Image (cartoon, rainbow, N blue to C red):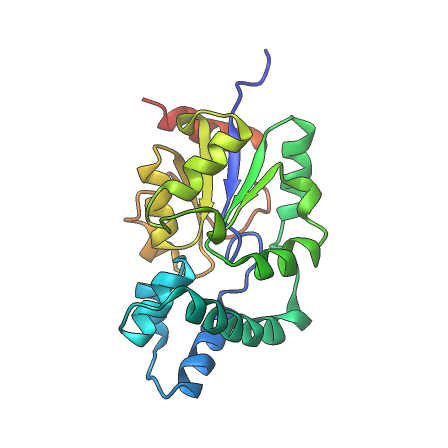
Amino acid sequence: MPDVPFAALFDMDGVIVDNTDFHINAWLQFAQQKGIPLTRDQYIDHINGRVSADAMAYVFQRPIQPGELIVLTEEKEAIYRELYRPHLQPAPGLISLLEALKARNVPTAIGTSAPMSNVHFTLDGLLLRPYFDTVVDASMVKHGKPDPEIYLKAAERVGVEPTRCVVFEDAFAGIQAGLRAGMAVIAVATTLTRDELASSGASLIVDDFIGLTVDAIREVVNKTVH
């Protein structure tokens, strides 16, 4: 029987790379340099998974103009890349899963709130770009997660109906974006614990990609279709 078509859409930070702690430390350093108090819990609740415009507006407690946003974002991301560069590696089991998806002709995409500089840093630094059919980053959408725009655009680009897509996410904002897009969601317990993710609406919670098969993912998609 031929494979029933579906697409796999991946968030980047905290999903294809387990880098959340480095982002948290970068945000804390950045905020400290600006004389702004910021905690890990505030990061989880208000910054994780969100586009820079929303995250910076929260940190500074005011709207950030586009020109200033570019400068502040690169300032923070430079701290992050400096911290994470020596540790850059794909999430456990990711390469095997991506190769299995490719072998079964499953379309794949990245849907990330990260700026383009971090997309280059991660995908090209790890030679992952050939595994993905398209990349949708923060610069390509008007509305960041939890708005579904990023994932709807990714689905459109790979030519698969949203209801036939599965989203891999670690953040509440991203999980909400996937659910609002009408997609199945598999949560990766890197940033949040399994207990914290239990009420997120995700169909499946995994620690990483080890042992995750194409058939198991298809089953999640099939169960989610109403």
Would you identify the image quadrant in which residue 161 lies?
Answer: top left
**Displayed quadrant of residue 204:** top left
Residue 218 at what x, y percent from top left? 50, 28
Residue 39 visible to an observer of this rendering = yes
Q: Nearer the viewer, residue 221 or 115?
A: 115
**Quadrant in which the C terminus appears:** top left
Is residue 166 positioned above or below 75 on the image?
above
Percent across and percent down for residue 205 are 42, 46
Q: Position of residue 141 (x, y in %)?
A: 43, 47
The structure residue drawn at horizontal position 50% and vertical position 57%, both measured from the top left corner, is 114
Residue 216 visible in the displayed image: no
Q: Residue 103 falls in which quadrant of the image?
A: top right
Residue 54, above or below 128: below
Q: Position of residue 152 (x, y in %)?
A: 41, 36
Could you tell me which residue is drawn at 68 percent across and 72 percent down? Answer: 86
Residue at position x 32%, y 84% in the image: 37
Which residue is located at x 39 percent, y 59 percent? Answer: 193
In-image side of 199 versus 21 (left or right):
left
Describe residue 101's horizontal placement relative to residue 199 as left or right.
right
